[in-house]
Amino acid sequence: MRRPSDDIVSWAIIEVLRSHGVIHSQRKLAQMVAARLRDLDPAYAVGEGRLRRIALRIPQVEVQVELRQGGDAKLDGCPCCGARLHARWGKDLFGKRRLQGRVCTACGLHMGAEGGVPSRYVFIWRSGRAQGKRRRGSRGSLDAFPST
Ligand SMILES: [Zn+2]
């Protein structure tokens, strides 16, 4: 087994998401990225956790986590990086202020308002997103990625 560089993994994630738009599970993304990587080198392997961390650094990729109730279902910090969460507010049908979801300002993970146990990660390609725009906090830049 060989460990591909972050740039190569980013390239494979971009290739897979650009052609599929949305991928509804981390395992599925990992399988598809692994297939791409094997085209380059049959010995390449990448773990799901590392894959998710790299995906979070790509400006055009939005990572959402689906949460479920259970156990001590209170989310104190980002399930991905542990940073503080930023609440997103909206209005309900009656015009009352209502918590819509939460965003991690450190890694960019999006999540719903309910539940506290991560159950599923969803990866979304946002092609219209300008580089670095609409992003808060410190993130990697696209400059490091191969342009192929
Ligand atoms: Zn985070």
Image (cartoon, rainbow, N blue to C red):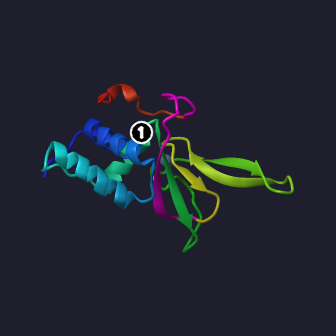
- Quadrant where the image shows the C terminus: top left
Looking at mark 1, is its residue's CB closer than 8 Å to ligand 1?
Answer: no
Residue 61 location in percent, x, y? Answer: 45, 42
Q: Residue furthest right?
A: 94
Q: Specify the segment rendered in magenta.
A: 116-136
**In-front residue for pair 125/78:** 125
**Residue corresponding to mark 1:** 57
Residue 135 location in percent, x, y? Answer: 54, 34
Q: Residue furthest top?
A: 143
Could you tell me the amino acid type at mark 1? Arg
Residue drawn where x is 29% and y is 29% of the image: 146
Residue drawn where x is 84% and y is 54% of the image: 96
Question: Is any atom of residue 4 visible in this view?
Answer: yes
Residue 26 location in percent, x, y? Answer: 39, 58
Residue drawn where x is 42% and y is 39% of the image: 57
SS category of the residue bearing label 1: loop
Residue 125 sits inside the magenta stretch: yes
Residue drawn where x is 14% and y is 45% of the image: 41
Q: Is residue 87 left or right of residue 16?
A: right
Residue 11 location in percent, x, y? Answer: 31, 38
Q: Residue 10, relative to residue 109: is it above or below?
A: above
